[in-house]
Image (tube, helix red, strand yellow):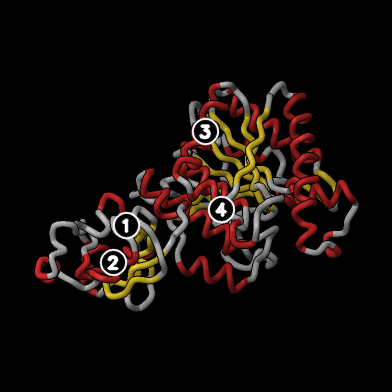
Amino acid sequence: MRTELKNPTRRRIVIKAGSHVLSDHGQFAHPVVEGLADGMVRLIRQGNDVVFVASGAVIAGKIFTGMDRALYPDHIKRPLAAIGQAALITECGHIFGRLDQPVGQILVGRDDFHHRERYLEIKNTLRALFRMNILPILNENDSVATEDSSFGDNDNLAAQLAGMLDADLLVLLSTVDGLYDGNPGHPGSRVIPLVNGITEGHLSEARYKGEHLASGGMPAKLAAIDKASHFGVPVILANGRASRVLARIFQGDDVGTYFQPRTNPLRQRKRWLAYSTHVKGSLVVDDGTCAALTRGRASLLSSGIVEVREHFGVRDVISIVSQSGEEIARGLTNYDWNTLQQIAGLNSAQLQARQWSEKIDEVVHRDNMVVLPAATGV
Ligand code: GLU
């Protein structure tokens, strides 16, 4: 029994339901949404801050217009999302309204997470809604998202939000019962109740099994869970259609799979740097610099830079990449690409000889750098 989840109060909980949880055979799944709404309202009344990430705009658009999913080309997806999002939030408004729970809608794009001010504004708006006792319902703004500017899936969006809010729990509700120890379709397979750190083994097994859900499938889900766990947020993956699923989770029952968070989570600003930013270019560094950055508390100096890639400006986010091509860190650069091309590989004596020394400090200061978890093997 997961006693730490029992009767939570004053916790911050992000709950995400997938498109196929909220719809069933081309129809809006009213009883499922009503059950989830009841669970969320109970949590709010117990004093918790709850965020609901509701997928299904595109499917709702299809239901509303009667279009067959297989028939619509990609450019129809955006207008379908526009139609469906209105239908989705209207349904949610009615269902939560019957429980006397007002809701507010926030539609976000990946770019909103790249810009520090916009990122902080989303956070402020969510906090204000919590204070006003309004349940925020979020989705990606699918009607304007492009292929390269989209989150891809709402698991990723929900993980970002959980990190942004320092959530106490992220609940991902899907149409599977959890992470299985074998092929979910096989009778001998069992749901793993507890996972302490997602490994490459979990990921490659999910990829091999080709499990696919609404978008992205299990590999994308595991990537989102891994991200949340680097933010220090525990995650439960459970079946959103199961009866009283939220009530059972918060009674401490062994529902779905519980993913323990990392014990050394990234701090807030570093979370933003690691996962929410738009990388403008990269610096390839030598092996000694890689080792110093991943093991120590070193800043990046010009002497370790082997190559400057892409055009970027001062204070842009850049990737720091090893010579074998692995991205080891990200950070805010103190110099633009042009300056760095001239000083790459030069140590302080060489900089001095070329009369650069007065101007050049750390290229990326340690405080403005995050070493990516994969690089340290944590
Ligand atoms: N944002 C998409 C929608 O509402 C769903 C993405 C997902 O299924 O994760 O239609």
- Looking at the image, residue 128 sits to the left or right of residue 310; the answer is right
Task: Give the alpha-carbon distance from disc 2 to disc 1, as whole Å.
Answer: 10 Å
For marks 2 and 1 on the same chain, the one whose residue lies earlier in the sequence: 1
* Pointer 3 residue: 6
For marks 2 and 3 on the same chain, the one whose residue lies earlier in the sequence: 3
* Pointer 2 residue: 340
* Pointer 4 residue: 156
The answer to the question of whether label 2 and label 4 lie on touching residues, with beta carbons closer than 8 A, is no
Q: Is mark 2 within 8 Å of ligand 1?
A: no
Which dot, 2 or 4, sits closer to the camera? 2
x and y, in percent, of residue 92 in the image: 74, 34
Q: Is residue 176 above or below residue 118?
A: below
The answer to the question of whether label 4 and label 3 lie on touching residues, with beta carbons closer than 8 A, is no
Task: Give the alpha-carbon distance from disc 1 to disc 4, as whole Å.
Answer: 27 Å
As helix, strand or loop, the secondary structure at mark 4 comes to helix
- Please tell me which residue lies in front, 19 or 354: 354
* Pointer 1 residue: 333
| Amino acid at pointer 1 | Thr
As helix, strand or loop, the secondary structure at mark 3 comes to loop
